[in-house]
Amino acid sequence: MIIDYTEGYAYLQTRPESDGEEPLPRLVNRRTLGYNLSLLLVLLRKRLVEFETAGAEGKLVLSRDQIVEMLRLFLTESTNEARVVDQADTTIRRAADLGFLRQLRGRSDQWEVRRILKAYVDAQTLSDFAGKLAEYAGTAPGEGRPDE
């Protein structure tokens, strides 16, 4: 069990295999995250870093429109605005189902970014993904653009 008292969360991590030991059974199934969800988690983690760097106290709360706007830059270009928003809403719901976002009570368009995201998307992953996004930004539209 990994406990982070300063951030206020805990999670279970599988113990690394040792020579001669049988591997322990997995407590939770691994899931492959799609492009949109991975992108959202990295973008939220980046916003969380910016929030903390600015010295802000409390919780990072973003509106649905702010999250959609963050995603819009990286989603497939479409003339159908409603489709883009629906795709972003689906991604937001998936992130909430995994526990990385929490909808504020009484505010259907306000989302709290949960600090457990820091354990899932570490600094190395953030750096690696930023490099891939820079690479991706250099390709022409339609050339190797990953879609979910």
Image (spheres, rainbow, N blue to C red):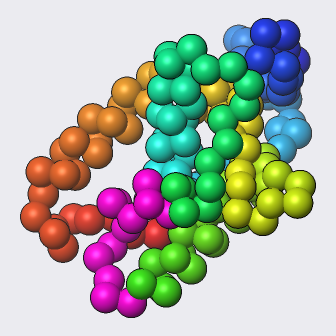
Left or right relative to 136: residue 51: right
Residue 136 location in percent, x, y? Answer: 22, 52
Residue 17 seen from this side: no
Residue 16 location in percent, x, y? Answer: 72, 18
Residue 17 position (above or below residue 129): above
**Which secondary structure is most common in the magenta stretch?**
loop
> What segment carries the magenta color?
68-80
Q: Write down the quadrant of residue 48 in the picture.
A: top right
Residue 37 included in the magenta stretch of the image? no
Residue 132 location in percent, x, y? Answer: 28, 42
At 18% from the left and 73% from the top, the residue drawn is 142
Residue 44 location in percent, x, y? Answer: 55, 42
Pick the front one: 30 or 136: 136
**How many numbered dots are placed on residues in this image?**
0
Left or right relative to 31: residue 77: left
Q: Write down the quadrant of residue 57 in the picture.
A: top right
At 29% from the left and 76% from the top, the residue drawn is 77
Residue 79 position (above or below residue 128): below
Left or right relative to 7: residue 117: left
Q: Write down the quadrant of residue 119 in the picture.
A: top right
Residue 79 included in the magenta stretch of the image? yes
Residue 122 position (above or below residue 83): above
Residue 36 position (above or below residue 40): below
Residue 56 seen from this side: yes
Left or right relative to 13: residue 143: left
Pick the front one: 60 or 142: 60
